[in-house]
Amino acid sequence: MDLVVATGNPHKVEEIRAILGPHGVRVLGLDDLGASVPEPDEPGATFEENAAIKARAYAAALGRTVLADDSGLEVDALGGRPGVHSARYAGVGSTREERDAANNAKLLRELDGVSPDRRTARFVCAICVAAADGRVLATSRGTFDGVIIDAARGSHGFGYDPLLLVPDAGCTSAELDPAEKNRRSHRGMAVRALVHLLPSIA
């Protein structure tokens, strides 16, 4: 079967292809199709709602089965924030690097004075696979747990990776070897969960 991933990020496509390819799925990115589809608004209150909105919109526009994901960071001491607003939490920045720096700075300000034992957090990824007629064919969810530290560490990854300490690894998500990060990641977990649902998708 063919499955289009609703992203122009080739690294995300490759990660998903590496997991689903051996199971008979031909994974394509938007760039592979030469497709230019306006990204829909994502007003959902949960990652699952936003993933479904995106999957249905792209599937209808392309006339193909589409996989879409929505992901972000949940911090327990902040009541789950930034959550679905993770990407533009600070509301400033015109580039990814600027947004990441502003988001991380805001997160650290909000956690100032919060003890380490209350800084538990997790990356969350929700995935939705939708058919061209709007039917949701499969959904899955993955999490990647850790603790928010006081200062950024590491150069791998992006977003909040340098602030999420992975206790059993003794390093941040941004200090993990990329292959190890993919093995542990919330997105990798969510995609691997789809493997068991493939018969219902095909």
Image (cartoon, helix red, strand yellow):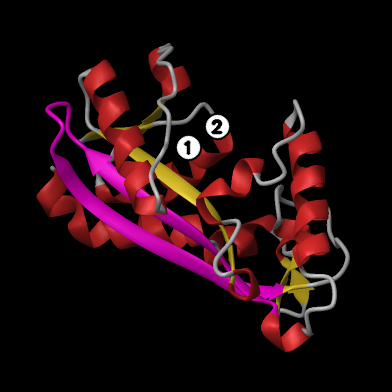
- Residue 136, above or below 144: above
- Going 77% across and 80% down the picture, which residue do you hit? 170
Q: Which residues are magenta?
A: 119-147
Task: Name the amino acid, label 1.
Answer: Val
Is residue 9 at least partly visible in the picture?
A: yes
Where is residue 137? Give x, y as percent.
16, 45
Spatial distance from mark 1 to mark 2, Cα to Cα?
A: 5 Å
Where is residue 91? Give x, y as percent.
69, 38
Q: Most prominent secondary structure in the magenta stretch? A: strand
- Going 51% across and 50% down the picture, which residue do you hit? 84
Residue 2, image quadrant: top left
- Going 58% across and 73% down the picture, which residue do you hit? 145
* Quarter of the image where the C terminus is located: top left
Residue 195, image quadrant: bottom left
Residue at image mark 2: 10
Q: Is residue 131 left or right of residue 41?
A: left
Q: Is residue 3 magenta?
A: no
Q: Residue furthest bottom?
A: 117
- Secondary structure found at label 1: helix
- Residue 60, above or below 53: above
Q: Residues within 10 Å of mark 1 (few under 14, many from 20)?
A: some
- Residue 29, above or below 144: above
Where is residue 60? Give x, y as percent.
22, 22
In this rendering, the count of numbered labels is 2
Disc sitting over residue 13 in the figure: 1
Is residue 174 at least partly visible in the picture?
A: no
* Quarter of the image where the N terminus is located: top left
- Secondary structure found at label 2: helix
- Going 35% across and 50% down the picture, which residue do you hit? 127
Residue contact between numbered discs 1 and 2, judged by CB atoms under 8 Å: yes
Q: Residues within 10 Å of mark 2 (few under 14, many from 20)?
A: some
